[in-house]
Image: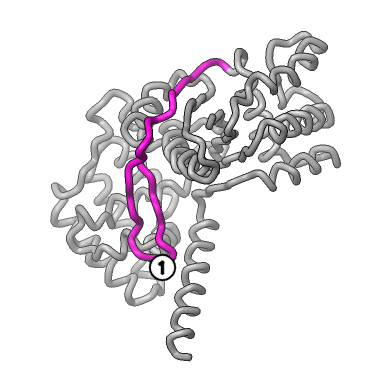
């Protein structure tokens, strides 16, 4: 199988800029889509006298027509999917705060089920998000990326002050209180390592977080279609080139499996070699240009029926993954419903 990936909403260190969303789109296919897609795009490019597709610069109707032709070609090439990861960048501050302070492997006051259980972890993320002001979020993010645990402790104080004014579930308040107390007394127990390497902050950027999620999508698609990963092609990246390559080399073969009963996730290693990782210019690769077009379409507020039709068709092929407060709320809601059903079954 082949994966073509492109991104939009570059972030780096700054998760509080005016562009609040980072998105990574990837076309997953059992066939190499670049050659047949090039046959579709080349006539348009020659007609307009450009060397690559520029979706944001062309009329919406024209891009929609090209998109339909591209999707026709993808359908003819065999099974495929569009994997979309969308990150609400400001929400990374409370989620990373939870990762640091409530990691049961480092904070001995946190029971394992409060970090590894999906319902509990997202309940903590929502609780912290409610109590984390913009000032506290910016203080935490800066301290986190600079390995400054004193700054993290100052953020804990700000969050704690807000939680004291808020009514929260007793069980959550107990685990938060104990976790904060342990963190204040045992700062050496917590690992922060962004400054050990030049540009070490990049491993916690939305760019790398979204790219890591793509690994699981590749494994799932490969298993579903019995097609081993052959090539992973990411649009040319200068700032994050090394970080993406290293992340893929170290973590690309990890497969996560979330049990249906809500217990701890299971981890295994792929029994096949990683796909070859490449970062060519999209100017030279029609597969990347097709990915860029589809990614553009997902985030565009349509003004024409033609683009609305393209987006509707694309939704049927899309596998999405979100990092946002809304997604945490949905995860908590779904898990609470599941627990209620299990409880009702035990009483019938």
**Total tally of numbered discs in the picture:** 1
Q: Would you say 61 lies left or right of 4 here? A: right
Look at the image and name its color scheme. one colour
Question: Residue at coordinates 51% horizontally, 25% vertically from top-left?
Answer: 234
Q: Quadrant of residue 215?
A: top left
Circle 1 — which element? loop
Give the image location of residue 165, x and y in percent.
38, 70
Majority secondary structure of magenta residues: loop
Q: Would you say 294 lies left or right of 93 here? A: right
Give the image location of residue 172, x and y in percent.
34, 70
Which sits in the foreground, 305 or 290?
290
| Magenta-span inclusion, residue 274 | yes
| 164 vs 67: above or below | below
Which sits in the foreground, 345 or 164?
345
Does residue 15 show up?
Answer: no
* Highlighted magenta segment, given as a residue range: 252-281
Which residue lies under the disc numbered 1?
261
| Magenta-span inclusion, residue 155 | no
Q: Quadrant of residue 195?
A: top left
Question: Residue at coordinates 22% horizontally, 66% vertically from top-left?
Answer: 178
Give the image location of residue 127, x and y in percent.
41, 63
Question: Residue at coordinates 45% horizontally, 75% vertically from top-left?
Answer: 339
């Amino acid at each position: 199988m082949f994966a073509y990936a492109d991104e939009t909403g570059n972030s780096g260190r700054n998760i509080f800029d005016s562009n609040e969303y980072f998105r990574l789109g990837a076309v997953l296919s059992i066939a190499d889509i670049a050659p047949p897609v090039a046959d579709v795009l080349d006539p348009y490019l020659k007609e307009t006298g450009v060397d690559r597709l520029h979706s944001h610069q062309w009329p919406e109707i024209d891009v929609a027509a090209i998109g339909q032709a591209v999707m026709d070609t993808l359908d003819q090439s065999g099974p495929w999917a569009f994997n979309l990861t969308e990150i609400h960048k400001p929400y990374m501050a409370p989620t990373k705060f939870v990762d640091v302070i409530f990691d049961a492997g480092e904070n001995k006051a946190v029971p394992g089920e409060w970090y590894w259980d999906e319902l509990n972890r997202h309940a903590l993320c929502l609780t912290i998000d409610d109590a984390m002001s913009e000032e506290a979020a910016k203080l935490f993010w800066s301290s986190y990326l600079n390995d400054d645990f004193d700054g993290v402790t100052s953020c804990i104080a700000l969050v704690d002050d807000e939680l004291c004014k808020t009514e929260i579930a007793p069980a959550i308040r107990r685990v938060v209180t104990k976790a904060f107390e342990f963190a204040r007394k045992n700062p050496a127990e917590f690992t922060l390592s962004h400054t050990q390497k030049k540009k070490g902050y990049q491993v916690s950027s939305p760019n790398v977080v979204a790219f890591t999620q793509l690994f699981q999508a590749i494994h799932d698609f490969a298993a579903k279609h019995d097609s081993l990963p052959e090539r992973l092609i990411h649009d040319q990246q200068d700032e994050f080139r090394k970080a993406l390559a290293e992340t893929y080399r170290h973590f690309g073969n990890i497969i996560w499996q979330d049990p249906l009963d809500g217990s701890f996730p299971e981890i295994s290693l792929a029994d096949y070699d990683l796909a070859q990782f490449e970062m060519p210019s999209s100017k030279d690769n029609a597969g990347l240009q097709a990915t860029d077009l589809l990614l553009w379409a997902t985030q565009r507020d349509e003004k024409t029926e033609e683009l609305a039709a393209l987006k509707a068709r694309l939704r049927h092929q899309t596998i999405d993954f979100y990092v946002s407060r809304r997604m945490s709320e949905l995860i908590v809601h779904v898990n609470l419903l599941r627990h209620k059903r299990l409880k009702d079954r035990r009483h019938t």
